[in-house]
Each structure stands twice: as C-alpha cells, then as structure tokens.
Image: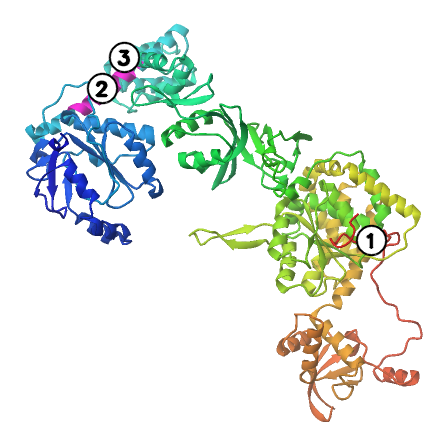
Amino acid sequence: MTNTYTFSFYPGPITKKIPQRDMGVKEAMDLIGSDTYKDAIIKLRECENDALKKTLKTGLPYFTFSGTFTKRLTDSLKKHSGLLILDFDELDINRLDEYKEQFKSIEWVLAVWISPSGNGLKVLVKIEPHFHKDTFLYLKDFFAGNFLLDVDDSGKDIARACFVSWDPEFYFNPHSKELNAEELGINKEPFELVQEKSIRVIAEEDNRVEKAKLSYKLQKDLKKAEHIVKQIVEKKIDITNDEYDLRMEIGFALATLGEEARELYKCAVQFNNHDEDDDAKFNDALKNGKFKTPAKFFKLAKEAGLDVKLPQSIQEAIRKSELKQAIGDEKQADDYLKYGIYLKKSEGVYYSLDMKQMPRVVSNFKLKILFHVNTSDAEAYRLIMIKNIHGLERVININTDDFVSAGSFKKVIARQGNFLWMGADADLVRLQDMLQREEAPTTMVKNLGFNRKGNFFAFANGIYIIGESKFLDIDPYGIVATKNLKGEPINYFIPALSKIFADKDDMYSNDKKFRLIVGNAKWIDWTELFCKVYGTNGRVGIAYFICSLFSDIIFKAMGARFPILFAYGKRGSGKGTMVQSILNLYGEKQDQVMLGGSSTAVGFMRKLAQFVNGLVWLDEYKNNLPVKTIESLKNIYDRIGYERGKKDNSFQTESTPISSACILSGQEMPTIEPALFSRNMLISFAETVRTEEARQLYRSLVSMEKEGLSHLTVGLLAYRNLVADKFQECYEEEIRTFSKLVGKDDIDERMLSNWSMLITMIGLLADQISFPFTVDEFREQCKELLLSQFSVLQGSDDTSKFWQIVEQLFTDGSIIEDKHFKLENGNIHIRIQDIYQMYAEAMHRRRDPNVLDRATLENYLRSDTAFDGRKKAQFGGKYTWGMVFKYTGLNVDLIRGTTEEDLREKLQAMGLKMDDEPVKTIKLPKQMDAFNDGFPEPDGKEVTI
C-alpha cells in the first residue's frame, strides 16, 4: 500500500526542526491538492519583493519525504521512507503543464506538482533506500540527457525539506514502479543504512567513493596512454618533432599517472634523438611535477595523427549489440548511440526508444536542413526541406526558437500540411543535434549592393565577386555558395528571388528589381547615346551615377558628406525621364518616392538604407514641405539616418543608416534654406521642341535600357580599388584646381567641394574608360553650373530675403521712401522697427517658415558687409536712430523716377550713373540639346514611359 511510504511533517517555519507527526503519501498529496494552503501559496506567488518572498516561503509547513526523523538532521533519521524528492527550479512558466505531461508518462514517477513559488515542479519517486545517493545521481543524469533539465542537487540530501504547495491538478500514481538499483546499473554492495552510521563513517564512505573515482580515472588514462604508445612503437614515429622541450613535457604529462607510466614514457620518446637517461628524466618528472593530468601527451599524439580514443569496451559492444537487435539496423543503432534518435529510411520517419528500450515512432516525416541563416545576433532561422510519409514535400523557413520547443515546432509544421511530431522536447533536441552536424552555416544578405565584409556587390539574383570579376548566381532557394576573404567556405542567402517567397508578391518588391541584367550595350555606346539624348545634363548624370557606385569611399574622403543631385524644371521638361534612365543601371528602374504624397521622412530614410551604394529618387520637391521633411533632406548629405528606441529595457537606440546616393527633383529650386540648397548640385531642364532625330535617339536609348544595363555597373566595379586608393588624393588636388578656375574668393565652400567630387571621378577614370567628353570640358561645365547656383544662393540667404521683401513692399506701395527709409549720399537709412511686421507677414504669405525674430534679423543685418553703422536721421516725421547700409552692396533696386531725367538725377545723388545699355543678368544655363520628349513625367497620375 502506498501509505507504507511514511515520512515526517513539520508545522513550519523552517527553523522548527522537530516534526509534528508522521504522514503518508496519499495524505500529503490530498493536502497539496486541497485549499488548505491556497491563500498562503497565492500570496507567495504574487509577491514581487524577493526578501519578503523568501520570508513567506520559509514560514510554510514542510515535509521530509525521504524518511521519518526525530529531528531534521541526517544522523537523526529513524527510517528511510523509500522515497526521493526531485526539485526542478526556475522553469518556463508557460511550459509547466507540458513538462508535467511528459513526466506523467514515466512509469516510475509517483507524483508531480507545482512548487510553492509557481515556477518549478516537484517530482516524487519510489527508490531502494540503500541506494538513495546513487539513484539521485542516476536521475540527475536522466533528466539532463532526456529533457535538458537540471535537478537541484539538494535532492541527494536525505533530510531535504520540501515546503507544502497548492496544485489542485497534481499527478499521483500509487501504482508507479519502484526504481531498482540493479536495473539502473548500480552494482555496488548495499552499504549500511544511514541511521546506523556515525558522521565519521559517512565521511569515510564519501572519501572512499572519491578515491574510487580517482582510481578509475587513473586506470582509464593509463589504458589510453598504453593505446597511444602501442601506435608509436608500431609506426616508429616521433611525436616530439625531435624537440627537447616536447620530450620533457611528455615526461611531465605521463608522470601524473605515477610509476606505472615509466615504461610508457621510455617507449613514447625512444624515437626522439637524445642521449640523456630516460629513467633519470622520468624520476625528475615524478619529483618536480609540472602538470596535473596527462592531457599534454594526449594532445601531442592527436596532433601527430594518432588515435587517442580507447577501443570499444565490452560493455559498449554489448550495448550496441542490444540496440542493433532492438532497432534492426546497425547504422541506425549507431545513430541512436550517437544522437539518441534515428531515421528509419525504409519508412521515412524518426524513431526513439521508450523506457523499455522498444522503438517508438516520433514523426510522420523526415527532414533535411538546407541552410542555417544568421540574420543578426538576436535572430536566426533555418531553411528546412520536410517530406511526410505520403510524399508531401515542403521547403520552409523556421525560426531557431521554434526549433527547440516541441509545442512551437508542431504548430509551424502543421501549417504546412499533414506533418506530425509525436516526440517530446528532448527528442526534438536530439533530432536537431543529428541534423545540425551537416548543416551549412549561411549569412543573410540584408542589404543589396556593396558588401564590405564579403567584398562583393549583391544583386537579387546573385553576387559579383569584385576581386575575382565573376558573378555567382543564386540557387532556387536564394543561396550562393562561395568562399570568404580567408578562403573558407561560406554561404550567402538572398531572399528576394528565393522559391520560398515565390508566392509572396508583396515581399522584397524593391529588392526583386535590383538585378543583374546582362544586355548588349557597350559602355562607350551607352554614354554617347545618353549624352545625345540628355545633352550636357547627361554628363552630370553619368558622373553622379559613378560616384553613387562608390559612395561609401567618397563619403569618407570628403569628410563624412555626400552631395545630392537636384534636377529642376517644369513638368514635361525631361528631368524625370533622365533619372529613370540612370536607375536602369541598377536593374529594373525603382519607383520614385513622392515627397508631396503620403511618404514620410522615416519612409524615404528607410529607402535610402535599403541598398548600399545604390541610388534613390525623391520626386515632387516643394519649398513648402514640412519642416521635418526639409531637415531630413539636409541629413541625407551628412548621411544621418533616423534613430528610434529599442523595444527592450536597455534604454538604447538603434539607427537606420543612409547608404545610397540621392537624386532629388521638383519644379521648385530648394531655396527654402541656404543650408539645403548648398547640399545639392543643381541642374536645370527646360522645355524644348523635339525633332524626329531626337525622337529616334530616345527610342534607341529605351531599347538599350530594355535589354539591360546593369552589366555596365558590374564593369565599373573593377575600378573600386583604384577609387579607394586614389580618390581622396585626387579630390584634394581637384579642389585647388577648380577653385582657381572659378576665381571667386567668396564662393560657397560646400558647393565648391560638391562639384569637385564629380570632376574628380571623371578625371580619375578618364585614363581607364572612355567618356564622350573631355575632363576639361566637364570641368568648365561644372564651373558654369556652380556660378549659376551660387548666384541663386546669394539671393536666398536670410538677409537677401529681407531686402527682396523690402523691394517687393516698395514696389507695391506698402512702404514709402522718406517715410520708412531714406536714400542719401550712397547710403540707405532704414528703421527695422517700422517695417518688421510687414516683413514677417510677407514671409508667411510666401509660406517660408524661416521668419527671423526682430532681434535676430537686426543681428544678421549688422553682420552684413554693406552695414555702415547706426545713425540718427530725419525721415518719416521723426528724427531717430536707424541702420545705415551702403546701397551698392545690397543688390536691391529702391531708386525710382517719374521720368528718365528724374531717375538720372536720383542716381547721381546716390553717386551712381544710369547705364544706357541693358543690364546684364546671370541666368541658369539651359541645355542646348535637351528636349521635351512629348511624354508626361511619371508621377503616377499620367502615362509612364
């Protein structure tokens, strides 16, 4: 009867060591299942204060399941109960029921219940009292090997206290099997019962066991050494390479095995060329031990190619024979010995063995891990081919976390069809171990384009190895097998065109366009035709495309900056068509991001992070875009992406870097802020009449683009090392050369460096590849574009805007001469306080957010080179202070005359004279051979070419 298993019960707290009474198993389990301690246990489980939680727990009543005691001390044991308690702490709460179900299937488990803390399990087992400790050690190994669970070592203590708990769904099997020591392989003679031993005898027993363990290891190491020395003698080899130090180390290593290893040492070093007495050397090694184990000898033997594993023991041979008989196949028996699971090929399913060593089927399918894909430190998954017994085959990607939990694994495979897993977590771990021995580690290519670690350029359909000038296609699963920079085998996973995602059109839509498409066009043919179609703007487009291909190098060389190309012109002027033509060099042209639509700053920043050394088109720029968008556009130049907080408790942020070049386009120049304007290189497109010859040239270019142009991109990658080695040096030299050519000391430094970048790239590659223009021609063109852009910049800064508004207000009659300002002796007197409100309102009407407050405006005006101080003057009916400026330094027209003669006199009074010739103005140069192609811009509302 179960109640014969009797033990002591204590009222608590833990400090009370005298038992209240004896109790049987059934009564104890009824107590745990009842509500007797429900409130106390719930209070404990809900407590979040660790110190208080410990106090609550140690205040509970408790059992000593392994026996009855006069006092809770080992030497106060009256009688062993024949029970052993196992404690599993800190388990995953979500898996407690799963573990409980698995434990219930074990025939020798008497009871299972949830621990008082709520995050662990208690397991009660019937054992032979004489073998308490040995049985515990067996069970510890059993649960570690089969469930990857660690049993608390406290279970080996016979006087171990176990607190009461509350689990109305406890498991109790009074007919469970008693663990038999002989069946477990515990072949020692039963030692005396604990209660009959003194503390001294127990200590002597532990010491004897420890000595036995040491003796066993010594004998095993001696046999291993004998096995190795036998090979040395038979093969007549010297594992010391005739080195004195290694011969001495062998002596020290074998001396750890004692006098019995003397002859082994003499045989092991006999082929080393030496004259010293081996016995004397071994005596010295015994006396002056350097090592604690013979591991050094085993290591040298292994490095010499010798077999350092002992031959199969008799017990191992018997075990293998038994398994072969149970399983029916030697190879499958070997697999079970090695992994604890095996594939029965004739059925295509996996088997394990039950507690009675009988085959137990655990699946209706077989697996093959194709690749293990590492995507990040926190994420990884495997590509797995799975085939069931009915012939249904699937290739799936499974997250690593789902491959270590039977519950999650079942859900993943069930979604694919009739795939069943009938094994436990431990079986799944064994299966994983068996399959992973031959899996291929694979790195996911997160960003197409240049890959610095692998030194290749990735497309959706393969990778171009830059140093070897060869292209490797992906396989049907999106895998490229190659070697890393060290020559080691490595696999890369590019998911965009993998058959795994073939039915998911919405995934990797942009990546799928980023493909190597090999056409028939030659570089010189394409560049000549491109420039004929798009004129001088085509030269700039070609140069900017090449720079984008090496933008990571250029960004560093230019001091952490990379300029934006701005295509400006009316709708239908051809600017969008040229940008599309350039994008064809990266495969199929990517869709532009519409700034005027629903796109957000975060959205286009992500687009700029999608490819490395790629090209992104942002369209529909307007000066009234949100301030956040304008700021983000400025950040593109400095490659400052957006940051966001991590979704964890680290309080850290993660950044989305900008890794592609950017072409910006719109019908308005980006003059809202000088800082934005100077970060762009401006090219203008004008409406032209297209001739039939021009139409034919354009059709030829489109035909060339349809065949594919990305092979030209691959050809340019051959010059990456040249750009990396020479660009910075050539760039610094070009800035000096270009600055002299421009000849303006006040030129904007940022704009000068931007255009110098393009000239540097053309100059660097001019000796390597052909261009349909010379470096000098291109430099002269860049000079004109720079000067034109700078003239616009001069009129777009904050003080220039103020004087433009003053001129506008004067023209429309809002401000009046001699009331709001006064012209005198070549100077203009003006009171800012009288006109500030009108200035601010005019800025708002322009939708210009950069309205300066009055103090800032006055400060900016004082720093102007035309500022001549503050003076009192009589105008507007009062004599008071105002600001004085030299009129000629303001580039403003505030002199009016009712007649030509009146105008002449006023000019003379200001020290100026009237020029009879028309005023010469500077305008942005218009391309001479650009044309209106007759097709509307591809803005999503009209027809796309």
Q: Position of residue 451 (x, y in %)?
A: 61, 39
Residue 323 vs 610, above or below: the answer is above
Q: Is residue 847 found left or right of 772 in the rendered image?
A: left
- Tell me which numbered mark, 1 or 2, is placed earlier along the sequence: 2
- In terms of sequence position, does the residue under pointer 3 or pointer 1 come before the other? 3
Q: Nearer the viewer, residue 692 or 867?
A: 692
Q: Residue furthest top?
A: 234
Name which residue type carries label 3: Arg
Q: Residues within 10 Å of mark 3 (few under 14, many from 20)?
A: some
| Residue, far bottom | 877
Q: Which mark is residue 781?
A: 1
Residue in the picture at 57% in, 50% down: 656
Q: Nearer the viewer, residue 843 or 756?
A: 843
Q: Position of residue 42 (x, y in %)?
A: 25, 51
Residue 271 sits inside the magenta stretch:
no
**Crowd tier of the residue under label 2, counting other residues whose Cα lies within 10 Å: few below 14, some 14–19, many 20 or above:** few
**Crowd tier of the residue under label 1, counting other residues whose Cα lies within 10 Å: few below 14, some 14–19, many 20 or above:** some
At numbered mark 2, what does the secondary structure look like: helix, strand or loop?
loop
Examine the image and state in which quarter residue 623 appears: bottom right
For residue 262, the mark is 3
**In the picture provided, is 262 more to the left or to the right than 625?**
left
Residues in magenta, as a range: 208-223
Q: Quadrant of residue 442?
A: top right
For badge 1, the amino acid type reads Gln
How far apart are the two marked residues, 2 and 3, measured between alpha carbons? 40 Å
Residue 759 visible in the snapshot: no
Which image quadrant is residue 250 in?
top left
The numbered mark at residue 183 is: 2
